[in-house]
Image (cartoon, grey):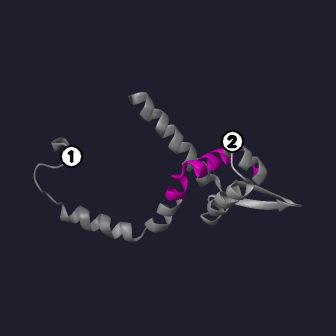
């Protein structure tokens, strides 16, 4: 830890701390953390990005994109579905996945926009 990373003296604004603690209680941070945890896995993020680039992909396509077995792709897709990141539809013997809603799409796009800005600052 470098000395410019922390306050040199302890100074707590009790009013702000109380207000923010109260506001945080109104947010379901544990459930949102699960979404970020799922997307923090490189394979699942690649799947999610793939689903932002195409309207929908079948499990076999996803497996080929990420270079895995169909079973592995299906496992990751199921987790994304259970967290509300992806949705699926079945057509005959094929299962197609897509991004669940516009908010998820925006979240993923925004993360990559942010990363590009960070890269440009360096």
Say which element carries label 2: helix
Q: Image point 53% across, 44% down: which residue?
A: 110
**Which residue lies under the disc numbered 2?**
53
Mark linked to residue 1: 1
Q: Residues under labels 1 and 2: Cα distance?
A: 40 Å
Q: Is residue 52 magenta?
A: yes
Residue found at the far right of this picture: 92
Q: Name the foreground residue: 33 vs 27.
A: 33
Q: Is residue 48 above or below residue 15?
A: above
Q: Nearer the viewer, mark 1 or mark 2?
A: 1
Residue found at the far left of this picture: 9
**Neighbourhood count class around disc 1 (C-alpha, 10 Å): few under 14, some 14–19, many 20 upward:** few
Q: Earlier in the sequence, mark 1 or mark 2?
A: 1
Q: Is residue 121 left or right of residue 87?
A: left
Q: Image point 54% across, 57% down: which residue?
A: 38
Say which element carries label 1: loop
Q: Does residue 100 appear in this view?
A: no
Q: Does residue 95 appear in this view?
A: yes
The main secondary structure of the magenta stretch is helix
Q: Image point 56% across, 47% down: which residue?
A: 108
Q: Name the foreground residue: 82 vs 11.
A: 82
Q: Is residue 109 magenta?
A: no
Q: Position of residue 76 (x, y in %)?
A: 64, 58
Q: Image point 67% across, 58% down: which residue?
A: 77
- Looking at the rendered structure, the number of numbered marks drawn on it comes to 2
Stretch in magenta? 36-58
Q: Position of residue 35 (x, y in %)?
A: 53, 59
Q: Position of residue 13 (x, y in %)?
A: 18, 60
Disc 1 + disc 2, Cβ < 8 Å: no
């Amino acid at each position: 830890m470098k000395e410019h990373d922390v306050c040199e003296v302890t100074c707590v604004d009790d009013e702000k701390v109380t207000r923010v603690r109260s506001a945080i209680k109104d947010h379901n941070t544990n459930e949102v953390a699960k979404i970020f945890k799922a997307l923090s896995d490189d394979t699942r993020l690649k799947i999610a990005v793939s689903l932002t680039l195409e309207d929908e992909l079948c499990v076999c396509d996803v497996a080929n994109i990420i270079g895995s077995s169909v079973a592995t792709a299906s496992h990751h897709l199921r987790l994304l579905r259970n967290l509300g990141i992806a949705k699926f539809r079945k057509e005959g013997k094929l299962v197609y996945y897509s991004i669940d809603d516009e908010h998820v799409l925006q979240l993923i796009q925004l993360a990559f926009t942010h990363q590009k800005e960070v890269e440009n600052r360096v």
